[in-house]
Image (tube, rainbow, N blue to C red):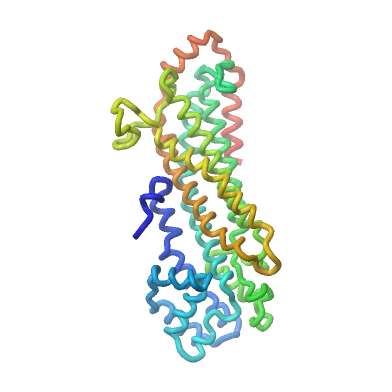
Amino acid sequence: MSDLLRLRPAATQAMIAIFDDHAVIAHACAFEVALAQAQAACGLIPVSVAEAIAAGVAATPIDPADLADEATLAGTLAIPLVRRLRAGLSGEAAAALHRGATSQDVADSVLMRQVMAARDLLAGDVARVRVALERHAVAYGRTPAIGRTLLQDALPIGFGLRLAQAAAGIADAWHQVDGAITRYGILQLGGAAGTRGGMDSHGRAVADHMAATLGLRSSAPWHARRTGVAAIGASLAVLIGALGKFARDVALLAQNGVGEAQEPRVAGRGGSSAMAHKRNPTGCQVALSAAIRAPGLVATLLAGLPQEQERGLGGWQAEGPVLADLCLLAAGSAAALAVVAEGLDIDAAAIARNLAAAGMGEDVGESAAIVAELLAYGKD
């Protein structure tokens, strides 16, 4: 079974793959191998034992469905995973596997590796949206259009100014996402109670070695300090909201009677099962649906911040699916709006017609200069 009918309309296939069962298992196995290699490098176990662990892990078949059933019973993925991996080892290698680590170390490190991969994937589509919006903003920066406040005609603006504001908001949000993931994409290695017990005072060196291997930052254990997870989630929600602002504006401009901009025509997209004449803004729909869902997801992360002592019950366990959903929604929104922004169908005649009907003149103030300022700001 799969849930692609639920996931795929809201997210990209590539982002779904980052968070699928096979990716989770691969990251968890990579954690165990990196732990053994780091401990061998620090002299805690023989190199031959680390090599045996790496070979045994690689040779162990793991069925996601079976592992999911076992994890449901155990309360955590790591317990049945480590049991299965140990079954493929013997002697000193079996005893050394997972030495000094705990289930949450695996779960948190897997999640951070997925978030790092999600950031790299998101960067491309977010950049596509920004570049396209900046191009349109420059091209239409001096084009007089109706400015609207409180959904009513206000005063003229340069049509490109609205697009530049959207681009600047997305740029600002992306800087927050990139900064949060860079800062908090940290390996988790604390052991049973966050003391790195069983590491013979080599815990920090082991963590440094593992972090370098797994592409994460190294830091003190953060198992009961969830501010980083909340910050990453909140920044993703801000990005989703900033993308949603652009989507909302396009949807309003595409309304009958306004018609100043439309989504590009894409085969199979934007139609109606009952009304063949319609040209629905379905790319904007994807982004706006994501923007509606994101705040509630972030609220879950915030609710989990008061963790109990050295390991919380229920709080951090709720974070993984929520952070995954935020990454999925951000990817779906950015990918849909990249297509919208790159092919945005701007109707200069409709813009001029609506402005003339409003009878408010063509003084757009310093619109063009503000466009330039906003686009420069987005590159800071």
- Answer whether residue 240 is visible to the viewer in this image: yes
Determine the residue positioned at 40% across, 32% down. Answer: 281
Determine the residue positioned at 50% across, 13% down. Answer: 355
Which quarter of the figure is the N terminus placed in?
bottom left
Most distant residue in the top direction: 359
- Answer whether residue 30 is visible to the viewer in this image: no
Q: Could you tell me residue 12's position as x and y percent?
A: 41, 49
Most distant residue in the bottom direction: 91
Q: Could you tell me residue 317's position as x and y percent?
A: 57, 63
Q: Could you tell me residue 19's position as x and y percent?
A: 45, 59
Quadrant of the rendered image containing residue 169? top right
Query: In terms of depth relative to the viewer, which is nearer, 39 or 84?
Result: 84
- Depicted 67 relative to depicted 281: above or below: below
Which quarter of the figure is the C terminus placed in?
top right
Quadrant of the rendered image containing residue 70? bottom left
- Depicted 320 relative to depicted 70: above or below: above
Determine the residue positioned at 53% across, 43% down. Answer: 240
- Depicted 57 relative to depicted 140: above or below: below
Q: Could you tell me residue 122's position as x and y percent?
A: 48, 49
- Depicted 89 relative to depicted 154: above or below: below
Most distant residue in the front direction: 73
Quadrant of the rendered image containing residue 215? bottom right
Query: In terms of depth relative to the viewer, which is nearer, 174 or 380?
Result: 174
Total tally of numbered discs in the picture: 0
